[in-house]
Amino acid sequence: MIPLSDEDIRARFSNARPGRVLIAIEHAALPVTAMRVLVSAQEEKPLPLLEEFTLRSVQVGLGNLAAIAPILGLDRESLADAAASLVLSGNLAYSDESGDIDLTSRGRLTAAEMVGLAPVELEIPACFDRAIWRVAEYVERDLISRHDAVERGMLLLPALRTQHVERRDLRLADLEHLVGTGRARSRRMQLLSVIRTRATKHRYLPIRLLLYADEVSARPELLALVEGEESFSHNDRLDEAGGATAFNMSLRRDAPASMRAVRSPEVSPPAESTTVISALDHPLHLADALLKAERRIVLSTGSLRRSIVGKQFTTLLEQRLRDDVLVHVALHTSDPAFVDRPAWDELTALAKRFANLRVVEKRNAPRALVYDNTTVRSSFDWLGYRGGRERTYFAGGGELTHDSEFADYVSESIMRYSSSNHEEGCS
């Protein structure tokens, strides 16, 4: 499964909650048990049951409906439709003069195939979603370990129940999707029973939680996005668990960006080059900086989260550093509660390798992101906008300015706070 990008998610789901605005995309994970299930199954029969019995009766020598009906406990008229269907399908030949019926060549082949049908035992792989307590059509290679999910700063959804998955928890209707035609098979299997189950490993499936805000609520509304589609069963589960309250999610509505932005009597953002952007625009500009910056990336952030500063982030950042882009990161806190150790280690390791990367701890640096001649001013937490125990999400706006002189001024303002008495370390 190729996950949707944030841009794709925004295009498809930004209007999924009327009256609310999509403000954040949270990385989360579902608890899933990978299993091997032994089932009794047989190929789905090609004929309806009444037609099958009629065909079998003719095969053993009963040549008309009057002889077949008493054996099946039915009247002759009840068998007429079944016999007519078999004649039309080319399995039976009917004599108008005598009213007798007989097998055609196709009918003999069909009867022989039915005789050959017998139950078989199959062991099939299955993924049991413990969040909704049922088998789901996930692909096992998409699952990750709990350690990986934690290292990536994902929000782990709780299981619906704490006990082990047992045989009675598996529904045949769910399992049949795993052994049926699927997208590439031409014959279906009919499951008769579950014989035995065996859990092989406990894993997690990465998903997305979309957060929507209105103008007054203190907490966001959640939408579960599983394998690229809205999952109503998981939405219901989230509601039952308490929604955003259960995950300690809240919204932060700051004053307009112009009241908190970098301000100076000498330099003001040119009005003709400045526009207002939404909360969800901010991560897209960070991605744009990591992908396209040619001269500089300067930002200040209130926290470091491994859900942001992960493998993909550091790979892109390293490429910018190799291209001689100047990168300066000002961290507003030394409190370990706001700094994930893996994220800090990643950044400081890069700083030791590249002289054009500087990571400093300094309070009161102007809140902004500058890349090349683009400036985004707001109190958005650039490297900590998702993840962490206190999940506070930015629901405000920002100001975007495309102007080289103003970008120079803002980047120098941020870096000025790093010129003396800074600490390069996080306890």
Image (tube, grey):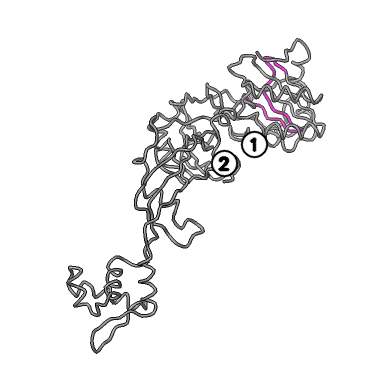
Which residue type does callout 1 highlight?
Answer: Leu
In magenta, the rendered stretch is 360-382
> Which numbered circle lies on residue 284?
1
* Marks 2 & 1, CB-CB < 8 Å contact: yes
Secondary structure type for disc 2: helix
Of pointers 2 and 1, the one earlier in the residue sequence: 2
View extreme (top): residue: 421
Which residue is label 2 attached to? 10
View extreme (bottom): residue: 97
In the visual, does 52 lie left or right of 388? left
Where is residue 207 shown, x and y percent of the image? 52, 38
Could you tell me which residue is drawn at 31 percent across and 75 percent down? 85
Query: Which of the 4 image quarters holds residue 290?
Result: top right
Question: Looking at the image, is 337 positioned above or below residue 381?
Answer: above
Secondary structure type for disc 1: helix
Residue 210 visible in this rendered orientation of the protein: no
Where is residue 130 shown, x and y percent of the image? 43, 36
> Which numbered circle lies on residue 5?
none
Could you tell me which residue is drawn at 75 percent across and 24 percent down? 328
**So how many labels did they put on this image?**
2
Question: Looking at the image, is 167 positioned above or below residue 102?
Answer: above
Residue 191 located within the stretch drawn in magenta: no
Residue 421 visible in this rendered orientation of the protein: yes
Which residue type does callout 2 highlight?
Answer: Arg
